[in-house]
Amino acid sequence: MVRSAAISVFFIGIGYDVTLVPRALKEGLSAVNAEEWKVAIGLMAITALLFFISFVLPNEKSKTLKKIKRHFEGNEPTKHAVKGLE
């Protein structure tokens, strides 16, 4: 959930930067307001924070995989007879 939010904010930031960078390159850095740069930097900071949170918090998939791994580590493999194969 957090990772999907981080990805969404990341692409919002990319879309916002796509409009800022060409204008800054064409007309110079002074053509872009300070508030616009603050928004771009803020989106990058929010994205980094959300990605960090998503790496720190365990998700359901990793919990399930750990349970499966623990199950197979403690149990010996069983052998089953299969009828009809010789």
Image: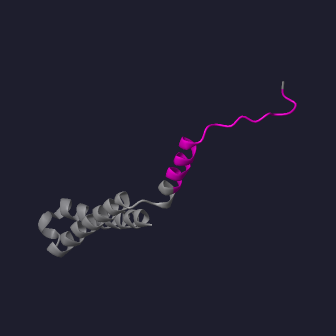
Looking at the picture, does residue 83 appear above or below residue 45?
above
Q: Nearer the viewer, residue 85 or 75?
A: 75
Image-based side of 39 in relation to 62, left or right? left
Image quarter hosting the N terminus: bottom left
Q: Nearer the viewer, residue 47 or 74?
A: 74
- Bounds of the magenta segment: 64-85
Q: Nearer the viewer, residue 66 or 45?
A: 66
Residue 19, how many percent across, how many down? 29, 66
- Taking the spot 53% from the left edge, 42% from the top edge, the residue there is 73
Residue 39: image quadrant is: bottom left
Q: Is residue 34 magenta?
A: no
Q: Is residue 72 magenta?
A: yes
Residue 83, how many percent across, how many down? 86, 33
Q: In the displayed image of the protein, which residue is found farthest to the bottom?
A: 35
Q: In the displayed image of the protein, which residue is found farthest to the top?
A: 86
Image quarter hosting the C terminus: top right
Say how many tags the image has.
0
Residue 13, how many percent across, how many down? 31, 66
